[in-house]
Amino acid sequence: MNNPEILSFDIKGIQECQQNRYPQLFVDSIVDVVPGKSARGFKNFTYNEWFFPSHFEGDPNVPGHIQIECLVQTFIMTFLCMEPYKGMKTNFVSINNAYFKRKVIPGERLEIRATLDSFKRGIAKGSAASFVGDEIACSADFLITLPDVLENFKPRKK
Amino acid sequence: MTNIEKYNKAFIESFNVGEDKLKGLKYQDIIAWDSIGHMQLMTQLEDEFEVELDIDDITDFSSYEEGKNILIKYEVNLNF
């Protein structure tokens, strides 16, 4: 049996796969990608991030919605790394079981581990969790669509 | 569980509707039967009946009744 293909992406490769761009791109590198199965991502936070001065003054930490974006931007790489999905737009359908366990502050490096449970007809289901060192930071389950793929499966008539 | 019970269960669980609402139900008649709900229904039917639906059948599957006709092509008899 052949070993599964393992892929890695730098920031240029990530932008070839997904449409998120600064200031909404929240992963620096993606490694250990098993297409259609799993991926591991990294995001380094420095005080230069645009949101730290306002969230919050005197207590800078990564907003929850950005932590969720870190998770999902790693998660979508599990399928956007594959042709013909590379570069397609994605939409949220649902975010479930989102938990925030610790603050993420300037100077910390977030590691994100994502798993794709199913991917069929433009609908991806799975989960991701982030860590600072060995400590879990946040986790969530996702249902994501690729609208350009889903469009092909909609009933033609009502 | 009979095939028609499995068929109804797929609708009930995918769309969270009562069995009494199934007759005459069409795509987009209820909020839950949108494009996402449609894919959930297709996946549940495939799992229940162990079939793989063709893309043309998925796009033709526009009502509760039409779905019954489509499943006959996959040798799923909903009469028992």
Image (cartoon, coloured by chain):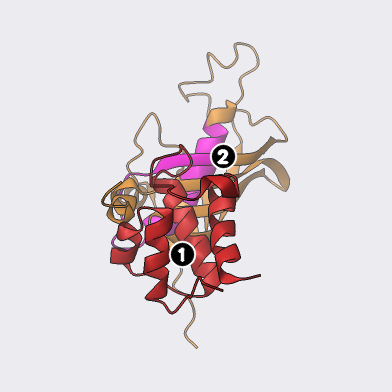
Q: Which residue is mark 2?
A: A95
The magenta span reads A66-94
Q: Which residue is mark 1?
A: A36
- Asked whether the viewer can see residue A152, the reply is yes
Query: Residue at point 53% right, 61% down?
Result: B44
Comparing A37 with B20, the one in front is B20
Q: Position of residue B59 (x, y in %)?
A: 31, 58
Count residues near mark 2 (Cα–Cα under 10 Å), then give few for <14, some for 14-19, many for 20+: some
Which chain is disc 1 placed on?
A: A
**Residue B35 counted in the magenta span:** no
Do marks 2 and 1 share a chain? yes
- Disc 2 marks which amino acid? Ile
Among the 4 quarters of the image, the one containing residue B47: bottom right
Q: Position of residue B31 (x, y in %)?
A: 46, 37
Of badges 2 and 1, the one in the foreground is 2
Q: Earlier in the sequence, mark 2 or mark 1?
A: 1
Q: Which mark is residue A123?
A: none
- The chain painted orange is A
- The chain painted red is B
Q: CA distance from mark 2 to mark 1?
A: 20 Å
- Disc 1 marks which amino acid? Gly
- Asked whether the viewer can see residue A87, the reply is no
Comparing B24 with A90, the one in front is B24
Label 1: which secondary element: loop
